[in-house]
Structures are given as C-alpha cells and as structure tokens.
Amino acid sequence: MTVQEVSNILNEWAPLAYAEDFDNVGLLVGDYNQQVSNILVSHDALENVVDEAVAKDCNLIVCFHPIIFSGLKKITGGNYVQRVVQKAIRNDISIFAIHTALDNVEHGVNYGMCKALGLENAKILSPKKNHILKLTTYVPHKNTQALSEALFSTGAGSIGNYEECNFQLEGKGTFKGNDKSNPVIGTAGMRHTEKETQINITFEKHLQSKVLKTLFTHHPYEEVAYEITQLENRLQNVGMGMIGELETAMPEGDFLSYVKATFQTGGIRHSALRGKAIKRVAVLGGSGAFAIGAAKAQGADALITADLKYHDYYQAENKILLCDVGHYESERFTKNLIADHLTEKISTFAIILFEENTNPINYF
C-alpha cells in the first residue's frame, strides 16, 4: 500500500477539502508513491515522534497537528520545525497531517469529546457554510439515466442524510448537430433536433472536479452547456464543534469535576458560575472562542473548549458556563480515533500509537 492509498482512506473519512482555509493539511513531507511499511499515529509530529518511527520501522507518520504551518524559507535545523523536517527526510519518512479536516467531520475530534463525556443526541454545533453547489445541465432524454447514474457515482446528489437530483423532462433547449459536430445522436452531415432533459444535482464543494470530469466524459455532446451555482444551505453533518446532552443534569461543581477527570487536565479556567444545573453541553476541540455565540444560540448550559482569552469570558454574560480545559487536553482523544480508523481499514501492516504526551504546557 502506498502513501497515496493511505491518504485516500483518510480523505474518505475526513475530506481535506473540509479543512479551514488557514490550515495546512495533507502530505507535508514525503512522496505519495512511497510504499508504506508501518504507520505511526501521533498528536504532533516532533523529533521524538520521528525517532520512534525510525525505531519501529514506520515510514509514515499520520498526525493531527501539522508540523509545517507557515512557509519554510530555509531548512538548516535552526528550530524544532526544521529539525523535524530534516530528520524525516533523512530517514525517508513521510508526514501526513489531518487537523481541521478532522475537526469538521461528524465522527471526528468533537465526536471523541462527546463520546468521552457520554453526551446524547449530539449534532454539529456550527454547520459549514458555502460548501454546497448545484450543477445544472441539459441532456437528450434518452441519455438522462446514464448521465445521472454516472454523476451519482461521484457522490453527487447526496448531501448529508438526503439525496437531491431534479429532472425537468421538458427542457427548454434543443440540440442541433451540424457537419462539424460529433454527437452520438444524428448522422454526420445532417441536422437533427431533439428535446432535452434538464438535470439539477447538488454536490459538496470538494467533489467539483470529479463531477465535471464525469459530466464531460459521459455527456453525449461535444460541447457541454452547464452551470454551477453556490447554494445558501449549510451542511448539517459537517462543521465545527458539537452539542449534546448529559444523561442527567449536574450541579456546576460536579460538572467541573467530571470534566477535569474526563480530560485529565491540570486545571479548568472557567467563567462565573451561574448557580444552574448543567444538562446541554457544547464542545469544540482546540481554540474555540469563535463558537461562544453559536453555543449560546443553541441553548448550551456549558461550552468546553480551549485557548480562551481574558475578554472571551465576558461573552458568557451569565448565559453559559465557559470551560477552558487546555488545547492538548481538549483534543486528547483524537490520535486514538485516527489509529482506530486506520486499524479498521488496513490489515496489511501495523498501525502504532505514539504513547508519549506531546503537550508543551505543564501545570504547577
């Protein structure tokens, strides 16, 4: 199995197109054509992670956080990022990062948090915007089924938990071939007119190139007329954070103790206690201050996240309990999710979990 094939497995689970624009995901070091010996799964790709990969004959590291986040102008070993890249290249080890692509999927980072807390009826907290497109094209009636089936095979027509594809059997346009065209209908040198079917089919943004390639391959016309528009709908199963409910409401003090034990954190920074029980809980792994408004809007009693700044706590406004458990701690279940998924999909070599704590923050 190659690095590309492992990448395909990960991309089916957490499409890299779901990653945030600021992020740097995918293969960061290495070669997609490299044959994989074993995989080491880690939260971060640090020097000791590369050392363990070498020791355990792993030539692919799949990590959550990208080791290269901004551009590298030189690789001279001047900092920890450069040293990791140097060591990986020297030992022919590829590094693949998944980061916010996994943050944005239904069974990713925030699912791990919900599962650890025992939250029920969990759903996406802040669904992704501007990610649903619609293709409109026209095709001769007799080619409608073949073209639509080809488009369906790309994943188009299925958004979240429902399918959408509309056929307008009495299309407005007609096709007229001529002596220079090469359509499957008609005969060269003759003109023919045939009624068309209008096809409207929705698809997720990351499928666009695949959908268009399939359209051009399976459409009978030499020149295909089509239009792609962006829909206002949000992807309900893709986005940041999740929200769910505890089986039984807890007093705030008990809830904070429960959260501290669950995430094994050295301490929780939180907003003022409200004197109200906690039942509905929002979670967002990593830096989640931007989700405070969404959590309040959806009636969360508490938001568990990380990296809250001084003024972020004022946004609680006695409407929600804000809990900062620490960045690493909020994502502590992530590497296990990745390892479990790869183990389920791959049986030809070992999937090894890096056990050391890579959290750079310590508590006194």
Image: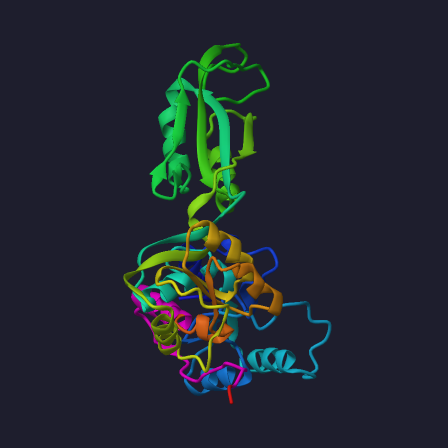
Q: Residue at 46% x, 66% y: name it.
A: 3
Question: Does any portion of residue 46 appear in the rendered image?
Answer: yes
Q: Percent position (x, y) of residue 301?
A: 41, 59
Nearest the viewer among 289 and 224 is 289
Question: Does any portion of residue 60 appear in the rendered image?
Answer: no
Nearest the viewer among 313 and 357 is 313
Q: Percent position (x, y) of residue 239?
A: 47, 52
Compared to 15, does 137 lie above or below? Answer: above
Residue 170 painted magenta: no
Compared to 18, does 328 lie above or below? Answer: below
Q: Residue at 42% x, 39% y: name it.
A: 156
Residue found at the far right of this picture: 73
Residue 340 painted magenta: yes
Compared to 229, does 40 lie above or below? Answer: below
Q: Quadrant of residue 344?
A: bottom left
The quarter in which the N terminus is drawn is bottom left
Nearest the viewer among 153 and 188 is 153
Q: Percent position (x, y) of residue 350?
A: 34, 76
Residue found at the far bottom of this picture: 364
Instruction: Please report the bounds of the magenta region as a residue range.
Output: 334-362
